[in-house]
Amino acid sequence: MPVVVQKFGGSSVADPDRIRAVADHISRTCRRGTQVVAVVSAMGHETDDLLHLAEQVSRLRPGREMDMLITAGERKATALLCMALHDLGVEADSLTGSQAGFFTDATHTNAKILEVRPERVRQVLAEGRVPVVGGAQGVSASRDVTFLGRGGSDTTAVALAAALQVDACELYTDVSGVFTADPRIVPEARRMSSVGFDELLEMTATGCPKPAMRSVEFARRQRVPLHVRSSFTWEPGTWVQEEDPSMEKAIITAVTYDTSEAKVTVQGVPDRPGIAAALFRALSDHDVMVDMIVQNTSDDGRTDISFTVPTEHLALAQRSCQDHAAELGATRVLGDDDIAKVSLVGAGMKSHSGVSATVFEVLAGRGINIEMISTSSIRITCVVRSDRMEEAVQALHDAFELDRPLV
Amino acid sequence: MPVVVQKFGGSSVADPDRIRAVADHISRTCRRGTQVVAVVSAMGHETDDLLHLAEQVSRLRPGREMDMLITAGERKATALLCMALHDLGVEADSLTGSQAGFFTDATHTNAKILEVRPERVRQVLAEGRVPVVGGAQGVSASRDVTFLGRGGSDTTAVALAAALQVDACELYTDVSGVFTADPRIVPEARRMSSVGFDELLEMTATGCPKPAMRSVEFARRQRVPLHVRSSFTWEPGTWVQEEDPSMEKAIITAVTYDTSEAKVTVQGVPDRPGIAAALFRALSDHDVMVDMIVQNTSDDGRTDISFTVPTEHLALAQRSCQDHAAELGATRVLGDDDIAKVSLVGAGMKSHSGVSATVFEVLAGRGINIEMISTSSIRITCVVRSDRMEEAVQALHDAFELDRPLV
């Protein structure tokens, strides 16, 4: 009998009605002759509510205790979903991360899976019952409860699908699949029926919020086909799988954006070896996460170095650069959080020249200034003013005709 | 170093402020040189909220899933209390029932403790840290999460105190101790500084709501001294311990009441052997819980049998009696849920005659009719009309001068 992992995110189980709707979907899948392993997140905004409670109680919030707290949310959801399934005549057993065999390291609040030994999941399946596993949780070698971090339920689902070697892993969410652009910005954005792992990874790395990047990486490594779909419409969504080289492919897959970063520019740096190294070593020592880095060529022996960081790291990054400005010989450090990254992603880019040129022409034609550029073999990213971001996304989507279905 | 178990009920940890107050109390106890093992219930009305959620999701509510759901409440509370302790510089580790070594049977929603192996609790103590244990929970032989039932946190605390052989078990609650009567009914009711296990058991069996009867039974069996006290005033409360025969004791300890029962009367039953047996066998087959039973002597070969049952069992009890009325030769079955039980409890009663007579005189003097009477060696219970209950409690409290401190 085929087996499928179905993962339901927080919005899919936000209230009793939605939990019953999910139970109904699982029972229909079972009736069609497919065994289901369910993975659930905490209900709606429960994780945020628990975090808020912790903030009210404590300034220090030890990771071990945060994990004990947060994982209570998924436990509730698993038990409630099992009850709803029993009501529909489907026997089901809730399993915590520990019961489902998720062994992790002890990095609390952001634990990594070391091994999945899903004996108990297999046993429940063998009894013809539905295992309902709490997402994003596991147990450490010291038998402490661990949490895999936000978005960790996707990782749980993929890891379980890999360990059980099931046919597919369905990620049910509040969007109906993966789109060529954010439909809130580009109304004619098209839902793709399939997308390759590499492309989706570039998309999630450049702002596409779902599915969680970590789970896509995991799925690619474990070769688990993903199906990203909606628990509100139950329509088929987007398949994520390895690219098939024989397939005719689009040159460009999607346009993404990210407004969560800020830019730092260190001006007047002497253009000689070792300067950039000193700068970024200092940033790294302060745990600042640096994303794009651009260094201009210089005429006069001095250059500007620009880089982007998460907005919440901006103050720290500026302070770190200021502290080293004299020592580096820099003249000025500027911070700017009114930027947006706009990215064009497509595996077909590799074999088609001229894509970059088109991007620059399209933006120039709209009078949108490009402040930084970075590229990979299947992506072009431009930093623009944040108030021009939506226009840039729409213009690129139009220019590459991403709304047209593939033939 | 002395060790004490401190148990905090739902009202004691109802919100972030209260959780911080509890942490402050634990930290003061530690600073005074006593090691603390904390046991906590779910916050405020959380258990009720979870039950309500389950009702909204499902008609069938399998016990295994209910236990997974309900125990999430205590997990949250343990983690939050640990965080608040860390903020005060007190290192603490939350432990689930399973981690704390509570092995139970598999009677979900009302599991019984089979064994407590608190290795991990001991280990945390040995490291100079505070173990914070989730109340009312354990793990079954099949490694499923189990719940000990409402009031089960008291049982957890007592069982842990017994297993660790600690010096005392403090039960913090929203009342400041055990009183000679409910202070809402008798304003001059006195908080006792100590009470014997036997007396407190009779009191809880006849309506005194706290502490939970099961935990008192457990404490008596394991000889664990209890200290019932308030987490709102932090004042010393009532010690519960074995009676010391050398001590001067009050004749009467307290007046209790219970309005949760109803009365069934089966009239005109032939007064011959086997009739009562047949009647109560039938009730037992229907799982009706029968409390007091009174059979009048008869003049004419026929008698009336009256008994009390929990009000929610009244309809079922009446139906069961009706069904057997013809067969038993009974003439009529009456149900009455406007009754109250008023009880006088005191270990000194054994050695002082005349207590019953005084009770009957006091009630007669007020024109309060006694409908049923039952006694044990340290208790007299009278059934009266429910609208006379408060007056009866007050009158008995006055008559036996229970407001007077012991000399």
Image (cartoon, coloured by chain):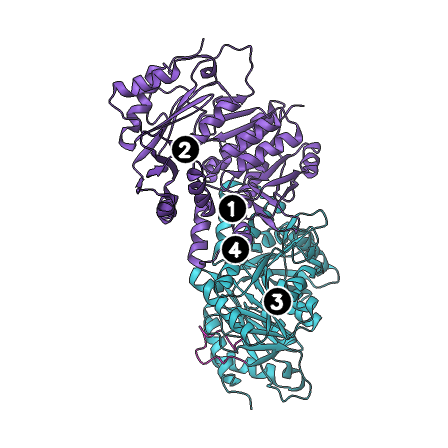
Chain colours: A cyan, B purple
The residue depicted at 42 percent of the width and 38 percent of the height is B276
| Distance Cα–Cα, label 1 vs label 4 | 18 Å
Residue under label 4, please give it.
Answer: B62
| Chain to which the residue tagged by mark 4 belongs | B
The local secondary structure at tag 1 comes to helix
Instruction: Return the residue found at the far front.
Output: B300
- Please determine whether, in this image, residue A367 is positioned above or below residue B166: below
Q: Are marks 3 and 1 on the same chain?
A: no
> Residue A77 got which mark?
none
Secondary structure that dominates the magenta span: loop
| Chain to which the residue tagged by mark 3 belongs | A
Percent x, y for residue A131?
A: 60, 62
Badge 4 density bin: few <14, some 14–19, many ≥20, Cα 10 Å: many
Residue under label 2, please give it.
Answer: B292
Magenta stretch, residue numbers:
A178-192
The residue depicted at 61 percent of the width and 67 percent of the height is A128
| Distance Cα–Cα, label 3 vs label 1 | 30 Å
**Quarter assignment of residue B32:** top right
Who is closer to the viewer here, A92 or A251? A92
| Chain to which the residue tagged by mark 1 belongs | B
Residue under label 1, please give it.
Answer: B73
Horizontal side of residue A264 vs A119, given as left or right: left
Which is more foreground, mark 2 or mark 1?
A: 2
Instruction: Return the residue found at the far right.
Output: A273
Residue type at mark 4 is Pro
